[in-house]
Amino acid sequence: MRVAILHDYLNQYGGAERVLEALLELFPDADLYTLLYSEERTHGAFRGRVTRTSFLDIPFVRRHHRAFIPLMPLASRFLSSPVRYDLVISSSAGYAKGFRVDGSYHVCYCHSPLRYAWEYDYLKGLPFSPWPLRKAILHPIAKLIRRWDKKASERVNFFIANSRFTAEKIKAYYGRDAEVVYPPVDTDLFHPEPVPGGREYYLMAGRLLYYKRFDIGIGAINSLRFSLKVVGRGPEEGKLKKLVRSPYIEFIPQASDDDLRLLYSNAKALIFPQTEDFGLVAAEALSCGTPIIAYGAGGGAEIVENRVTGLLVGEQTSAAFARALTEFEGMKWDREHIVHRAERFSKRSFVKNISKLLDSLGVAPSTSKP
């Protein structure tokens, strides 16, 4: 059985790339197609696995890919293969489902419909300024990309969504139903590892992007005498550092998986103020026994069980999170139970659910004809 796996771009390493790793473990002989590939920026996780990239795959674009979003539909159209596969699986938040890699059956694991096309607030994080000029230029481009994205969705036979929140978007934007399979946490890697004297700080982690709302967590901590560690790097880093008013806020640009496990395990809680399609960092933190203080919308509302594995905050403001942090300080948490509840996000659950779904569609290796 010939399988192709398509992924938007591989010039960063985050939740979507962890999903891709799990898919490649499930299909170790699959060919891998992507618009861009940087071995350095993906920490060698996909060394020797990439079959083909697009004409955009040059060093400058890899470093500044968001500036080239208008060209990505065109690059997707020209990323093709002479081979016809038995099964194509796209791991996509936009572009991969539109690659011209054909197969008898196309399953899309959808992290999100293309955000820049459908949700204009995401455009505010792009590297153009001032905003009124960006709006005048980018909104017409976004409308064109939206039409392309809708057309690309028609190449898919079956959608799998990473959350109920994403499934609702797929229905609203593409008019398609989707089954939900939560992304995988590697629980062999992310498990509790407390150290003496830990749990003296709060944590935020992820790419420093506009929509992830690190500013809310920083604003909340500014008003309190609590410690906060911010792990990650991204285009918002400079702006976020300028917001800091507290000597108890520390930025950690990069952390290995082992470092991240220790940071999760020894944090009081992960602060998660964004509206995410899922939010793998929150599921990883739970697997380490760490409660979450999350905005009660999007993926956060599906990951966190209020007052069981964390607190859900009703307003997406620094003031609301400051109140939640103050309340959190007086609460006790059963961290062993949190680890147990996180099992539904484990890689074991992901592989089992994906395999069962593909089998029901008749496209798993065990059910396909030679």
Image (cartoon, rainbow, N blue to C red):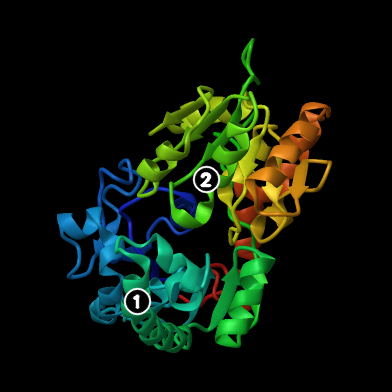
Task: Compare marks 1 and 2 and give the one earlier in the sequence.
Answer: 1
Identify the residue under disc 2: 215
Q: Residue at x 58, y 46 (%)?
A: 216
User: Taking the image as drawn, is residue 17 in sight?
Assistant: yes
Horizontal and vertical percent for residue 249? 51, 27
Residue 332, label in figure = none
Give whichever of 345, 14 is nearer the camera.
14
Q: In this view, does 62 lie to the left or right of 345?
A: left
In the depicted structure, whether residue 52 falls above or below residue 18: below
Residue at 42%, 76% in the rendered image: 97
User: What amino acid type is highlighted by mark number 2?
Assistant: Asp
Tag 1's secondary structure? helix
Q: Where is residue 3 in the image (x, y as percent from the top left)?
A: 40, 69
Q: In this view, does 25 lie to the left or right of 72?
A: right
Total tally of numbered discs in the picture: 2
* Quadrant of the snapshot with the N terminus: bottom left
Q: Is residue 76 above or below residue 249?
A: below
Return the x and y of residue 159 as percentages of the image width and height. 57, 76
| Dot 1 alpha-carbon crowd within 10 angstroms: few under 14, some 14 to 19, many 20 or more | many
- Could you say whether the residue bearing mark 2 is in a helix, strand or loop? helix
Name which residue type carries label 1: Leu
Question: How packed is label 2: few (under 14 Cα within 10 Å), some, or many (20 or more)?
Answer: many
Quadrant assignment, res 99: bottom left
Q: Quadrant of residue 9?
A: bottom left
Q: Position of residue 266 (x, y in %)?
A: 62, 23
Q: Residue at (19%, 62%) from the top-left corner?
A: 57
Which residue is identified by label 1? 138
| Mark 1 → mark 2, Cα distance in angstroms | 24 Å
